[in-house]
Image (spheres, grey):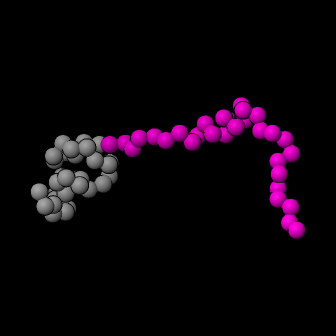
């Protein structure tokens, strides 16, 4: 029968919170489209108008 690993000592609240200090979620950075002024992800084609870098890259329905 295999034994399961068990910690020898209890982890203190400070150590546990210190380890989890980097687990916070951050909102994505948004940039304004130069063509239609809608918010979009930077370095990505605008999903609203299909422009990237001043030229049309995708055809949109609207």
> Residue at (39%, 44%) from the top-left corner?
28
Residue extending farthest to the front is 1
Q: Residue at x 77, y 38 (%)?
A: 11
Q: Locate the N terminus by quadrant.
A: bottom right
- What is the residue that sits farthest to the top in this orientation? 14
Magenta stretch encompasses residue 12: yes
The answer to whether one can see residue 39 in this image is yes
Quadrant (top left/top right/bottom left/bottom right) for the C terminus? bottom left
19 shown above or below 56:
above
- Residue 38 is situated, as x and y percent measured from the top left of the image, at 21, 44
Residue 53 versus residue 25 in the image, above or below: below
Q: Residue furthest bottom?
A: 1
The reply, left or right, for residue 62 in relation to residue 3 is: left
Q: Position of residue 48 (x, y in %)?
A: 19, 52
Q: Using the image, determine if residue 32 lies above or below residue 47.
A: above
In this rendered view, identify the residue nearer to me: 12 or 45. Answer: 12
Q: Which residues are magenta?
A: 1-30
Question: Magenta: predominant secondary structure element?
Answer: loop
Q: Residue at x 49, y 41 (%)?
A: 25
Could you say which is closer to the camera, residue 42 or residue 38?
38
């Amino acid at each position: 029968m295999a034994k399961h690993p068990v910690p020898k000592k209890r982890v203190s609240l400070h150590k546990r919170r210190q380890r989890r200090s980097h687990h916070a979620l951050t909102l994505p950075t948004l940039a304004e489209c130069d063509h239609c002024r809608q918010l979009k992800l930077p370095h990505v084609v605008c999903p609203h108008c299909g422009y990237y870098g001043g030229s049309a890259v995708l055809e949109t329905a609207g």
